[in-house]
């Protein structure tokens, strides 16, 4: 009987730990809201912790990242909102929007491509590179602008030209 009780306690602890982990993973405490010009397709290059650059705005628990048409955003902000730089905070959520003269709207047709991150030696500064397209054009854009190219060299940031 004692063995059964120990097994049940261990099982209960494992289930509770699993549920806590799943809650944390699917209910992150902070996130990012990306804003791209309407129909943007191309490389996005975001440099974080760049001295002398403006800080990102914060709305609630989300960093706001408005990507200009040239695809380059430089900010003095950290990647996360967490105030303690020694606290590692993951996961986060991301939301994507298009902006235009008519306002903002959810980027439902947007599709994410690949990317990478580089770190500047001797500083906290790092740059995140990724490309986006639309759901309709992601495969053709991948073939035309990404496949067969050395994407580990600095990509040309900004919208692709047709």
Image (cartoon, grey):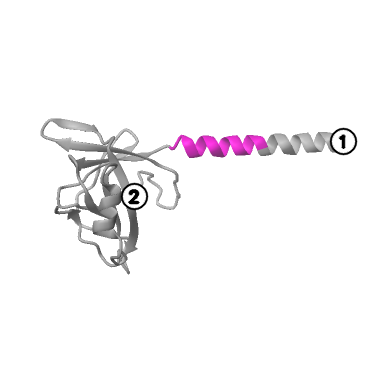
Instruction: Single out the residue that lies furthest toward the right.
Output: 1
Horizontal side of 103 relative to 77 (left or right) equals: left
Name the residue beneath numbered marker 2: 79
17 falls in the magenta region: yes
Tell me if residue 29 comes above or below residue 117 in the rendering.
Answer: above
Give the magenta range.
Answer: 15-28
Q: Which mark is residue 102?
A: none
Q: Position of residue 49 (x, y in %)?
A: 28, 55
The dominant secondary structure in magenta is helix
Identify the residue at horizontal 44%, vertical 53% (top origin): 86
Query: Circle 1 is placed at which residue position?
Result: 2
Q: Position of residue 97 (x, y in %)?
A: 25, 37
User: Is 50 in front, or is 117?
Assistant: 117
Judging depth in this view, the residue of 159 and 15 nearest the camera is 159
Where 13 sits versus 150, above or below?
above
Give the CA separation, mark 2 to mark 1: 50 Å
Q: Is residue 82 above or below residue 150?
A: above
10 Å neighbourhood of mark 2: few (<14), some, or many (≥20)? some
């Amino acid at each position: 009987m004692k063995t059964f009780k120990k097994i049940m306690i261990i099982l209960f602890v494992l289930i509770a730990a699993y549920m806590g982990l799943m809650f944390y993973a699917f209910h992150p405490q902070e996130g990012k809201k990306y804003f791209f010009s309407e129909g943007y397709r191309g490389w996005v290059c975001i440099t974080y912790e760049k001295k002398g650059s403006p800080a990102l705005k914060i709305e609630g628990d989300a960093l706001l990242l408005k990507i200009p048409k040239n695809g380059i955003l430089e900010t003095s902000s950290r990647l996360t909102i967490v105030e303690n730089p020694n606290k590692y905070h993951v996961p986060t959520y991301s939301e994507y929007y298009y902006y235009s003269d008519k306002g903002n709207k959810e980027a439902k047709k947007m599709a994410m491509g690949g990317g990478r991150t580089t770190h500047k030696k001797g500083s906290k500064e790092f740059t995140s590179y990724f490309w986006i397209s639309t759901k309709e054009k992601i495969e053709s854009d991948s073939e035309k602008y990404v496949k067969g190219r050395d994407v580990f060299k600095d990509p040309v940031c900004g919208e692709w030209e047709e």
